[in-house]
Image (spheres, rainbow, N blue to C red):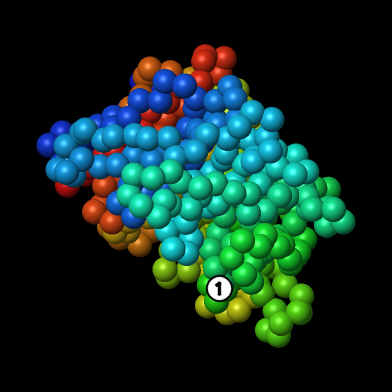
């Protein structure tokens, strides 16, 4: 099958939204490098960028008038060539204690399997941020491999992350007992060889997607439940297996978003981004009333061979996401049905037709939607940071 052209996106369950309700603005142009992660933290927007070197971390500061477009950008840290401090930062950074910013690199570090880096804010305003390698992956003897998922907040300042070696490994990265000491890693559980997403679940548990395996070979969504007593084993429960009845569950499970009522919203995508083989969809998994019972799968929207490769964002009952295709892609909003059993309605908030593919949506505290775009290979790596105001 051929990919749907961008023009076809407008014809798929399209609902027009009044132009006065949507304001799209490019707030920053990245001339060198392709953004690979974004996070609004503390009123600023942090962006990690991969470039032809090892990459860098940007800090974008809003203007005095938050609704204006004059955002200023400064480079907080540039990863040196050679990878001693990590190389190719990936995924949105997260905020830790005392304003520190943590993130992941996919390579480099002491063992060349990637790092968790730490950026400490300056003691005086206007000073330089301080970078350090909090943890180098694949420490000798652990055989944990490189990071494969985003960082997820854990108890007492720790982080959870999936790593991949011969299979998926759930790690807990533990802060040092004393300032200046290095972080450590605890190996908590095993997962499938293609486990590459991690989301916080209820009662301290975690949800994982595995792109392969399961009853039908199409991947799974797995619940990892912590032990009741310290030092015990984590329990793995498969919530749903993909691959059966392909029209009902196209593509491989990719990202997950967990609602406060326990509903899981997720995405599936085809095999290789920018090649557009396979199919994409947005779906939900609804828990049953009994512990250990089957979960109900519902396809919310079918995107064909347009890729949905970033997590859905939930706000006020609506879902927001990005779709990519050879022309660029679009930012969409999915609105739930007005009556049980009805269809979700899709609205495209903005379309990209300049070879820039959108991803990485996040809301800040004001309700402004932020995202990033990156150029499609083999074009030189460039990108943008944008915001969408829908009120």
Most distant residue in the top direction: 379
Most distant residue in the right direction: 141
Q: Is residue 149 visible?
A: no
Dot 1, crowdedness within 10 Å: few (<14), some or many (≥20)? few
- Residue 261, by quadrant, is bottom left
Q: Is residue 354 visible?
A: yes
Is 278 in front, or is 211? 211
Most distant residue in the bottom direction: 229
* Residue tagged 1: 156
Q: In the image, residue 183 lies at what x, y percent? A: 66, 61
| Residue in the picture at 66% in, 62% down | 181
| Residue in the picture at 85% in, 53% down | 140
Q: In the image, residue 158 lies at what x, y percent? A: 59, 66
Is 368 in front, or is 82? 82
| Residue in the picture at 29% in, 42% down | 61
Q: In the image, residue 118 lies at what x, y percent? A: 55, 51
Is residue 158 shown left or right of residue 84? left
Count of labels in the image: 1
- Image quarter hosting the N terminus: top right
Is residue 178 shown left or right of residue 212? left
Q: In the image, residue 95 lies at what x, y percent? A: 46, 57
Residue 140 versus residue 310 in the image, above or below:
below
Is 332 in front, or is 112? 112
Most distant residue in the left direction: 20
């Amino acid at each position: 099958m051929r990919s749907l052209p961008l023009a076809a996106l407008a014809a798929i369950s399209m609902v027009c939204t009044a132009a006065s309700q949507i304001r799209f603005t490019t707030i920053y142009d990245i001339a060198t490098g392709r953004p690979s992660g974004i996070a609004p933290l503390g009123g600023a927007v942090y962006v990690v960028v991969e470039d032809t070197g090892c990459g860098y971390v940007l800090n974008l500061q809003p203007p005095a008038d938050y609704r204006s477009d004059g955002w200023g950008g400064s480079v907080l840290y540039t990863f040196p060539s050679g990878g001693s401090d990590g190389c190719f930062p990936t995924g949105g950074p997260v905020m830790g204690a005392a304003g520190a910013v943590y993130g992941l690199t996919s390579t480099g570090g002491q063992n060349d399997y990637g790092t968790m880096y730490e950026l400490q804010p300056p003691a005086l305003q206007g000073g330089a941020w301080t970078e350090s390698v909090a943890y180098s992956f694949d420490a000798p003897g652990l055989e944990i491999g490189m990071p494969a998922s985003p960082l997820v907040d854990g108890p007492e300042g720790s982080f959870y992350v999936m790593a991949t070696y011969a299979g998926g490994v759930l790690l807990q990265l533990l802060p040092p007992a004393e300032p200046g000491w290095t972080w450590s890693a605890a190996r908590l559980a095993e997962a499938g060889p293609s486990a590459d997403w991690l989301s916080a679940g209820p009662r301290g548990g975690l949800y994982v997607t595995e792109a392969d395996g399961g009853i039908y070979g199409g991947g799974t969504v797995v619940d990892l439940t912590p032990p009741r007593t310290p030092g015990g084993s984590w329990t793995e429960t498969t919530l749903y297996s993909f691959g059966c009845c392909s029209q009902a569950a196209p593509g491989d499970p990719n990202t997950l978003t967990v609602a406060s009522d326990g509903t899981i919203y997720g995405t599936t995508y085809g095999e290789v981004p920018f090649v557009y083989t396979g199919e994409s969809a947005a779906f939900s998994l609804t828990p049953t009333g009994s512990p250990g019972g089957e979960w109900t799968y519902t396809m919310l929207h079918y995107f064909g061979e347009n890729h949905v490769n970033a997590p859905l964002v939930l706000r006020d009952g609506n879902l927001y996401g990005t779709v990519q295709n050879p022309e660029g892609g679009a930012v969409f909003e999915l609105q739930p049905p007005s009556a049980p059993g009805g269809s979700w309605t899709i609205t495209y908030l903005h379309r990209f037709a300049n070879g820039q593919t959108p991803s990485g949506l996040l809301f800040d505290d004001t309700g402004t939607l932020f995202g990033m775009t990156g150029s499609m290979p083999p074009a030189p790596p460039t990108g943008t940071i944008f915001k969408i105001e829908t009120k």
